[in-house]
Image (cartoon, rainbow, N blue to C red):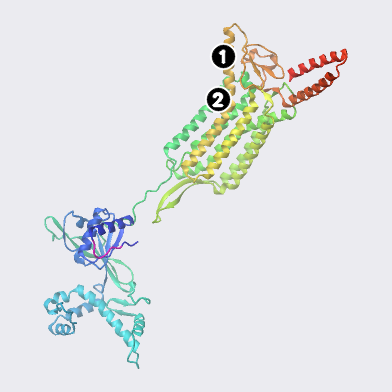
Amino acid sequence: QAVEFPFDITPEIVKRTVKSVKETQYRYIFSIMFSTAHHDAFMTEAYEQGIAGTGDHFWMFSDSVSTSIFERSFEIGSPLHLASKGCSRISAVAGIEGDERYDTFMQSMADLNNPNDIALLQSAHPTPPEGFEPIQIADDTEKFFAKSNAAVVAFMYDATIALGLSACRAGGQNETFFDGKQLFSEFLKSDFNGVTGNNTYDQATGTRLTESAQFSLLNVVEDTSGAGGENTVRLKTVVSDVFPNGSWEELIPMRFNDGSTIPPPDLPPVEVDMNYIGWTLRLAGWLSAVFVVISATYLAIWTYKNRNKSVVLQTQPVFLYLICAGCSVMAIGIFVAGIDDEIASPATCNFLCAISPWFFCIGWVLAFSAFYAKTTCINRFFHNPVPGVKIRIETGDLVVPAVLLLSAVMIVLLMWTARAPPDFERKIYEWNSFGQPTKSRGLCDYKGAVPYAIFISFVFFISVELALRRAWEARKVSVEFAETEYIVLTLVTICVISMFGILLWFLLDHSPAALFVVTAALIFLVSMAMLLLIFIPGIRFKKQVKRRTEANSAFGGSSGRLNMKHGAANVAITGLDFLSTHNQSTIDDDPNLAPPNRRDSSGMIVLAHPKEIDLLKGQFVSLKKEYDELKRTKSTRPAAKQERSLEKNKSESSKSV
């Protein structure tokens, strides 16, 4: 990237130019300047803007500036002193001392420093324009024949030889005259070893090819010989590298601005955004997992303590235990998902990536097998209703679906872990304009697990669909504590949460922090939906029974029974004993007070069945039609008597409905 400035500079131009150079963020700067004024103005401003004299930048100058710009004294610690030391200057050179052709040419130049050759050269020297003094070689022979001038003369010598050889080729043996195009065409064909090396030229422009020339790299360093004054330091140039035969050769190590021989980085250091999960989100996710585990443990302990109470017996402890266990296992998966290479080694992250799906899948199977077994039993009763009985989950009802689901899932997980174990990979996904990485993320790579994940998802989907459909079909079967309604509500809530959570998971830009938040939130909400919607109704019911028992005792009552009418949103506590009917049940908080046929049993008591209600409604409609027919024909006493009988039957039927 080039930044240009006019030859005539002002402080504003200098400041603007240096600012543009700084904005490129490059640390190796090649400068083409033409005077001491340029050098001093730009290097002072570069120091002020922090791109020179800091040890982080390397300035290289072309041979358009003389070495005298550097070889002078500076005030110690001044901007020019600090900015200039460690710089370099690259220039084309006639040759390297020790090369036979170069040494011979330099000796021939020195031999010209005699009166006869000086007179000859002076006579051939061109006359300068009016107003300019002609150069008098004899006045300063040391300067005229100095090595610096001899180096320039060497290039001029080779160029003159190249033109002479080209003219010979263009003129040929028989022709005397040629034009400029013919001369230039022959000049491009030049290829000979001259004083300055192998002379070859660019076929388009006629410029000397870079690789055919020789270069030297000068290093600006402090002169330690004591040439400076008390408060000044003198800088000098030394040859550090040469380019004699198409490649660079180091003579002495280059000294950079910081005084060391270690090159500064060519670009500014970049702080890569690693996109870790971070401790804030990690602790928040882990706290949610702890809350789920503590809640599940508390509810499991509550179930065990109340295992002989009717509210637990009728819900069935094994159903509640499995839900608690499944939710706890899924919650442990949050702890695993919250670990990345910020706090663990890559090997540990690889292991956690492999076991992470196990927690969610096994936890889901444990919890869901209980729902599946219960909805299956409810659905079986829905199609074969027997009013007044209990729906109870037998061991076989629970074991069979749990074993089948768990076996299928574990077989797939074992194959997945053995054949395509996921690995933790940190990938770069964003670079700056220099190609430096600026953002990366570490995630588990599950690309090889697609077929296994599809199979497990299919098993889960089919299981959820069957359980939800069976629960929805039997939702109007009236049982104690309205369990069917809560089971349906739980399954629907889980499906809705999972659908939105999975959709959001795929829509995210694969940010580890965002994915962890969604995963933790999804597991937390699903687990708490299971625990709250299944346990809270039973806990509330038990507390209401306890309060009613205490109230009855205060008024001299002896029973803590509860009258719970089917279909009521709230439990009505009356303190009265009653007999069981199709739409009422007597529920005892103390199993010792319950009827003998209920003390040692568990399961949901069926209060009413929708098919039974539909049958009664049909009977009511039939009787109403018969009543209306008899009412129109009541002309005799027997008819009136029969009408009264029908009205009585209608009234009893209405009460039954």
Q: Quadrant of residue 499?
A: top right
Quick one: quadrant of the N terminus? bottom left
- Residue span colored magenta: 4-9
Q: For the point 56% across and 37% down, which residue is it?
A: 360
What residue would you read off at disc 2?
Answer: 299
**In the image: residue 103, left or right of residue 656:** left
The spot of residue 567 in percent (x, y) is 66, 22
Q: For the point 52% across and 30% down, which residue is it?
A: 292
Q: Is residue 5 rendered magenta in the image? A: yes
Rendered view: 205 above or below 176: above
Q: Amino acid at mark 1?
A: Arg
The spot of residue 483 in percent (x, y) is 64, 26
Rendered view: 459 above or below 613: below
**Label 1's element?**
helix
The spot of residue 415 in percent (x, y) is 59, 44
Closer to the camera in the image, 90 or 611? 611
Q: Quadrant of residue 86?
A: bottom left
Which of discs 1 and 2 lies nearer the camera? The answer is 1
Q: Does residue 85 appear anywhere in the picture?
A: no
Looking at the image, tell me whether mark 1 or mark 2 is earlier in sequence order: 2
**Which class describes the residues within 10 Å of circle 2: few (<14), some (14-19), or many (20+)?**
many
**Which class describes the residues within 10 Å of circle 1: few (<14), some (14-19), or many (20+)?**
some
C-alpha distance separating marks 1 and 2: 21 Å
The spot of residue 200 in percent (x, y) is 34, 77
What residue would you read off at disc 1?
Answer: 547
Q: Quadrant of residue 650?
A: top right
Q: Main secondary structure of the magenta part?
A: loop
Q: Does residue 392 appear anywhere in the picture?
A: yes
**Label 2's element?**
helix
Numbered tag placed on residue 48 in the rendering: none
Task: Check the image and name the residue furthest to the bottom.
Answer: 174
Q: Amino acid at mark 2?
A: Leu
